Image (cartoon, rainbow, N blue to C red):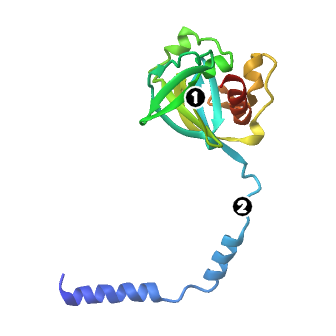
Amino acid sequence: MSSEEEHIDSTASIELLDRQSPEGYQREWLERIRERPDDDVKDTMPALVFRVAGEWLAISVTCVAEVTSDAPVHRVPHRTNEVLKGIVNVRGELQLAISLRSLLALESGTAEQMSAGRVYPRMVMLLREGERFVSRVEEVVGVIHFEKDEMEQVPVTVSKALATYTRGIFSWRDRKIAMIDDELLFHSILNKYL
C-alpha cells in the first residue's frame, strides 16, 4: 500500500468516527443505561461444593482460603482426637488438620459413590477471623452460585450432627447439597476440640 492510499484510508476512518450520530441516538442509549435491572434477578450466593464420606456439602467461599492437593496428616502426641487429626504442611506452613467426617458424624460413602469416575482427594483450607483449619475431602466440584431463596430447611432424616451444622439444603445438578453453617463450625472446633 502506498503512502497516498494509507492517507486516504486514515482520512476515511477519521471521517467515519467523527460523523454526527443519528437524531435521538444519544437519548436512546441514555435511557437504556438508566433502566433498572429486571426484578427477576435473583440473590445468589457463591459456595464451594465438595464431598465428604458420600455427603455433598457446601461452604461459603468467604471462609475458603484455598484448595490444595492431598497431603499427609501428622499426629500431634497427646492432642490428636476424633476431630483434631494433627497437623499438615501447606505451602511450608503447618496447619491444624480437622476431620469434617468425624465432626459431622458422617459414615463412609457407598462403594458406588466412591468409585464413580476419577476422584481426587483434596485438602480444603478454611479461614475465618484469623483461624485456619485444613480438612481432607474426597472430591471438590468447585465454586457454584445458588439462589438463596431456594435453600430449604434441613429434613428430619438428616443425621443429628450434620443437621446441627447445616443452614439449609439446596439442589444442584440433581444432588441435594447441605450448606454448612461456617460460624457454628468454627465456634465448635475452637471451643470443643482445641
Label 2 sits on residue: 37
Q: Please give the count of numbered marks on the rendered protein.
A: 2
134 to 157, vertically: above or below: below
Depth check, front residue: 139 or 81: 81
Q: Dot 2: what SS? A: loop
Is residue 56 visible in this depiction of the protein? yes
Which quadrant of the figure has residue 102? top right
Q: Residue 50 carries which label?
A: 1
Which percent across, then down, holds residue 96? 55, 28
31 to 128, vertically: above or below: below
User: Which amino acid, by three-letter code, is at mark 2?
Assistant: Pro
Within 10 Å of the Cα at label 1, are there few (<14), some (14-19), or many (20+) other Cα atoms?
many
Q: Which mark is residue 150?
A: none
Which percent across, then down, holds residue 98? 59, 24
171 to 41, vertically: above or below: above
Q: Dot 1: what SS? A: strand
User: Which amino acid, by three-letter code, is at mark 1?
Assistant: Phe
Q: In this rendering, which labeled residue sits more in front, label 2 or label 1?
A: 1
Within 10 Å of the Cα at label 2, are there few (<14), some (14-19), or many (20+) other Cα atoms?
few
The residue drawn where x is 62% and y is 24% is 56
15 to 81, vertically: above or below: below
